[in-house]
């Protein structure tokens, strides 16, 4: 369904491993219900959004300006409080992710915030999310979060996760009446 030319046309700087996984991943996509051109298009659009056009494998957590850091996490930082986390990705990840999403299982500050930061095509965050999707696809992401960096694992994880948002078979959605009432 997806070709290298199509993907490269949309994302000229896409990582080769993502392109290869998507081009050869028809069976994985179909397994999780991405079996029509529209569903594949929606899936691909979400992956492109999450990975900055297929260029990001893991969330870097490296910020160079406090203005940007405060803009990304306005509920956690202002420009002044963000300064101490500039160019400190592990400390930042521990601060924003360390005490939630199951990342505190060995105590806050155990490295889980960084270990379970955004990863792969779906940019999963948090130990609990890694474990849940790992179970769905049969990969131990809870004990081996680095496996999300494998493009084929990443594709399976994204397809499994995003499949939850597919409408049930036989359900159709029409936006015509909504649009006309605006």
Image (tube, grey):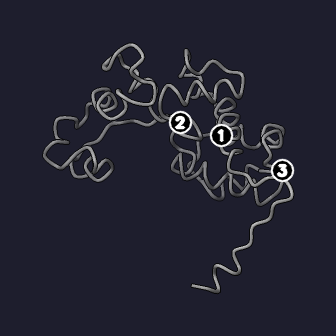
Cα distance between the residues tagged 3 and 1 = 15 Å
Side (left or right) of 50 relative to 163: left
Do the residues bearing badges 3 and 1 touch, measured as CB atoms within 8 Å?
no
SS label for mark 3: loop
Quarter that holds the C terminus: bottom right
Side (left or right) of 106 relative to 50: left
SS label for mark 2: loop
* Nearer to me, 104 or 25: 104
Q: Identify the residue at horizontal 42%, vertical 24% (top origin).
A: 103
Mark 3 crowd level (few <14, some 14–19, many ≥20, 10 Å Cα): some
Do the residues bearing badges 1 and 2 touch, measured as CB atoms within 8 Å?
yes
Q: Residue 73, position in %: x, y?
A: 31, 47
Q: Residue 146, position in %: x, y?
A: 54, 22
Looking at the image, tell me whether mark 3 or mark 1 is earlier in sequence order. Answer: 3
> Which residue is tagged 2?
124
Looking at the image, tell me whether mark 1 or mark 2 is earlier in sequence order. Answer: 2
Mark 2 crowd level (few <14, some 14–19, many ≥20, 10 Å Cα): many
Vertical relation: 71 (above or below) 98: below
Q: How many marks?
A: 3
Looking at the image, tell me whether mark 3 or mark 2 is earlier in sequence order. Answer: 3
> Which residue is tagged 1?
161
Which label was assigned to residue 120?
A: none
Q: Residue 99, position in %: x, y?
A: 35, 27
Cα distance between the residues tagged 1 and 2 = 9 Å
Q: Identify the residue at horizontal 66%, vertical 34% (top origin).
A: 157
Do the residues bearing badges 3 and 2 touch, measured as CB atoms within 8 Å?
no
Vertical relation: 154 (above or below) 33: above
**Hey, which residue is sitting farthest left in the picture?**
80
- Which quadrant of the structure image shows residue 137? top right
> Which residue is tagged 3?
35
Cα distance between the residues tagged 3 and 2 = 23 Å
- Which quadrant of the structure image shows residue 89? top left
């Amino acid at each position: 369904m997806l070709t290298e030319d199509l993907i490269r046309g949309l994302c000229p700087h896409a990582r080769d491993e993502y392109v290869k996984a998507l081009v050869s991943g028809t069976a994985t996509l179909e397994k999780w219900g991405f079996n029509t051109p529209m569903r594949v298009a929606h899936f691909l659009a979400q992956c492109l959004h999450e990975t900055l056009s297929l260029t990001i494998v893991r969330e870097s957590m490296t910020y160079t300006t406090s203005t940007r850091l405060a803009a990304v996490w306005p509920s956690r930082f202002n420009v002044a409080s963000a300064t101490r986390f500039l160019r400190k990705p592990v400390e930042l990840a521990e601060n924003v992710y360390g005490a939630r999403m199951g990342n505190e299982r060995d105590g806050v500050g155990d490295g889980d915030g960084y270990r379970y930061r955004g990863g792969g095509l779906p940019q999963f965050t948090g130990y609990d999310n890694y474990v849940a999707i790992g179970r769905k696809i049969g990969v131990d992401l809870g004990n081996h979060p680095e496996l999300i960096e494998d493009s084929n694992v990443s594709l399976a994880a994204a397809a499994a996760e995003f499949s939850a948002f597919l409408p049930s078979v036989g359900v159709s959605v029409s936006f015509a009446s909504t649009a006309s009432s605006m």
